[in-house]
Image: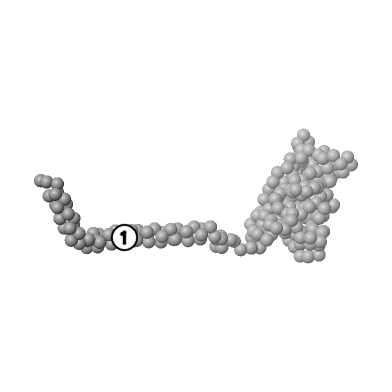
Amino acid sequence: MSTMDDKRLRTLLGELADEVPTHRSVPPALEARFRRRVAMNSVVIGTMIVALGVGAFATVRALGPNKASIAPLTSSSAATTTPACTAGQLRAIGSMTGAAGSREGYIELRNYSAKTCTLRGTPIIALYDVSTRISTSLIFDRTIAQWQADAAARPAGWPVVPLGALGSAHNAAQVRIRWTNWCPQGRPAPLWRVSIPGSGMVDVVNGMDSAGSPPCNGARLPSHVEVGPFEPSPAA
């Protein structure tokens, strides 16, 4: 084939190519397939958005204040805010009766201040020689409250005992006492002191010798005192 024939062939092929129409539209099958893919992606994205929204709402609720867990203020919780009594607020008076081989009764602690306070627990008792003011050997034991010994109803708020200010009702507490073995026989009655928890000592001003001292049941043994916890005084 000559050079002239080649040129004519190329020209003819170019003219035929120009006559072929250009397809700019997407085939229907491919378009339907594309639309399905877009719809599926939209559903997945929408589900993720809803899930994230629900999770965020739950997180905000969890971080928010839980009003149901806040306990209302009650009388017992209010009582705990009342300060504890100090030794300087109190006066102690005893009342004892005779029993076989012992002396039994109570020590009453009355609030002589202008402020309400509370007592709780079991105090420690100390006995002092009235002349030398030196503490004597003593066995100290805790015992039950008088209301428990009487099988009575539990006092409201116990073991916390509120003491009203001077002149008001319910301004005294008491502790149950049982005392045995005071030697030698005929020895003068001791000075009693009550230790107030977290504070100092209060002298029992009178009443502990009203029934006399208990008999000496063992010359080589120390005196023995049993003390109950603070409880409301019936006389207050």
Q: Residue at x 16, y 58 (%)?
A: 16
Applied colour scheme: one colour
Q: Is residue 37 left or right of residue 118?
A: left
* Residue 76 occupies quadrant: bottom right
Q: Position of residue 154 (x, y in %)?
A: 64, 59
Image point (66%, 63%), residue name: 75
Quadrant assignment for the C terminus: bottom right
Pointer 1: residues within 10 angstroms few (<14), some, or many (20+)? few
Q: Residue 35 at x, y = what percent?
A: 28, 62
Amino acid type at image mark 1: Val
Q: Specify whether residue 103 is in view.
A: no
Q: Determine the residue positioned at 74% across, 40% down.
A: 139
Count every numbered label the image shows and give the total. 1
Residue 42: x percent and y percent?
34, 61
In this rendering, the answer to whether 32 lies above or below 229 is: below
Q: Residue furthest top?
A: 220
Residue pushed farthest right?
131
> Pointer 1: what residue?
38
Q: Residue furthest bottom?
A: 168
Residue farthest left in this picture: 1
Query: Depth check: 9 or 184 in front?
Result: 9
The answer to whether residue 79 shows anywhere in this view is: yes
In the picture provided, is 69 more to the left or to the right than 97? left
Q: Residue at x 68, y 48 (%)?
A: 143
Q: Position of residue 192 (x, y in %)?
A: 81, 47
28 or 92, which is in the foreground? 28
Where is 27 relative to 104, above or below? below
The local secondary structure at tag 1 comes to helix
Quarter-wise, where is residue 171 in the image? bottom right
Return the residue nearer the eye: 218 or 117.
117
